[in-house]
Image (cartoon, rainbow, N blue to C red):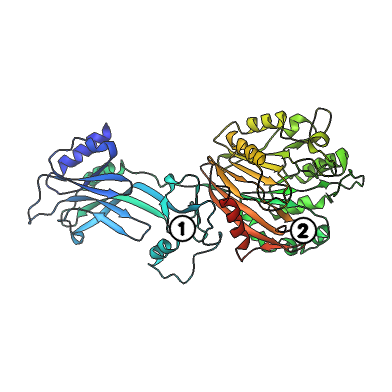
Amino acid sequence: MKRVILLTLLSILLFSCSPHIVLEGSESNLNLLNLQEEEEYQLNDKQYQSFIPLDEPNDKKLPNLIITVEQKGWNNETKEFENTLFDKENYRLVESVLIKQSWYSPVANLWESDPFQPFLTAPKDIKKGELSSEINKQYPTIINVKDIKAPLKGISLWGSHLGDKHYPLVQNIYLNLYEAIAHPLKDKDLQEYIKVLSSYKTNPQSFDVYWLGANGDMIFQRGVDTLFRRSNGSTKLFNDTLKIIPQVDLMIGNLEGSVTLRSNRTTKSYNFKFPPFILGKLKSLGYDFLSVNNNHSYDYGELGFKDTLKYFKEAKMPTAGVGLTPEEASKPWTFTKNGQKINVITLGAFPQERNGFNGEKQASVTTSRAGILWNNALGIEAVKTAFSDPKDINILYFHGGREYQETPYKEQIKLYQQMIDYNADVVLGSHPHVIQGLQQYKNGLIAYSLGNFIFPGMEEMKHGEESMILVVGFLNGYPFYIEPLGVQISGIPIKLDKTGSIVKRLNQLTKALK
């Protein structure tokens, strides 16, 4: 009510002037006095009206105050809507108030590539003042952030994202108060007008994008552990992927084996075990969470599995979906950053191996056996409980699917989609040892298989050395940015794929799942 009175008072006090008083939405029905004419300007997605008082000044006297609307857009256009009698040379700007802010983003379908690699800067050869035309040329579809829905995803602007300091795709609308230089008001009176203007002020919108990075299967055997021990071993092994791993807020990977010094193997085709030092080293590189819920966590039996849990605890490396008891295995790893709560849990769902190893019967946690959380009644209930609050960011890492198959099978698709129904925001998959496509289901993202990552010995397997780091940017809990980075495995070492061929094939697999 006070705001209505102040604004009505403003229109009365300016009876000898010709200002533009700007109102929005339902407030346009305010009882402004002395209205002769109404003009409308279509700015963004809402209607703004400018009201011109009845009594106009004569040529001998300028209005004391004028209020204008100014639109400053990311497309380098500045439009100020004002009375035709308004001559800026005779006025000084005394106050400018932001009344509306809109953010825009380039978008693409899930299966379309970002035309530029993320985390890069804008091309240096773009001249000042030409950014707008270059953006429109390179990014043909740009829409308001609030209108982006699946299967559309936001894509980076040459590596710039919402929330970045100099993100350019912002459009602001201001109310500007001008005072006639020849007829200044008393400071006390001027402050009253400024106070009215300020009542329309809105705070600039801020965006906190939370970044997830995820990769697939890793083993530290077959010569990897020897290289990793060296002082420069991390650089030799991970190469330029080390530019990505520490940049994200949460980096997740699948450790495909036991962390143990024991030698008593489970009867299997392949047995993987790793020395304890790798956990501290991976943590120092930027890994925040490692899953050990997989078909190799029991390669050295229950004792080797218990060793793994012990070494994880000593290294303070988070994991989840594994434990000495069902209660422990059912607890998600949970933490909070900038007020946003994140929950991570893992499930096993891999089929029985050809050698006879059955994960559900031989490695799943029970009241009498330490083990992994399985896709059964216990596991499903754990997921539902962990993801009970839809406002949280909920991440599920699955170890399932069929090995060496590029397409998820029907039951796998149904199962992973069911996890989205249980409030998972992202479902990550491993086990097939090749990349499978991405899929947006409702408001969630599914990566059916992230493929191998650190996994020598796949040279003879078709596409076995094609890998990726999946980078996901959450905006208000929604997977807004989806940026897969291709990674090429070359025996032991890995490096980012700068040819784009891996992401291109991933997009083809993704498109087939739409």
Locate residue 374 relative to residue 13 in the image: left or right: right
Q: Which residue is tagged 1?
A: 166
Q: For label 1, count other residues whose C-alpha is less than 10 Å away and answer few (under 14), some (14-19) or many (20+).
A: few
Alpha carbons under labels 1 and 2: distance apart: 43 Å
Give the vertical position of 295 relative to 75 (above or below). Answer: above
| The label number, if any, that marks residue 287 in the structure image | none
In primary-sequence order, the first of circles 1 and 2 is: 1
What residue is at 68 percent from the left and 57 percent from the top? Answer: 467
* Crowding near the residue tagged with mark 2, few <14, some 14–19, many ≥20 C-alpha atoms within 10 Å: some
Q: Is residue 378 visible?
A: yes
Work out whether 445 lies above or below 364.
below
> In this picture, is 123 found above or below 350?
below
Q: Residue 29 in the image: x percent, y percent?
A: 22, 35
Element under disc 2: loop
**Disc 1 residue type (three-letter):** His
- In front: 168, or 152? 152
Residue 334 x, y percent position in the rendering: 65, 38
The residue tagged 2 is 458
Three-letter residue code for mark 2? Met
Label 1, secondary structure: give it: loop
The answer to whether the residues at label 1 and label 2 have Cβ atoms under 8 Å apart is: no
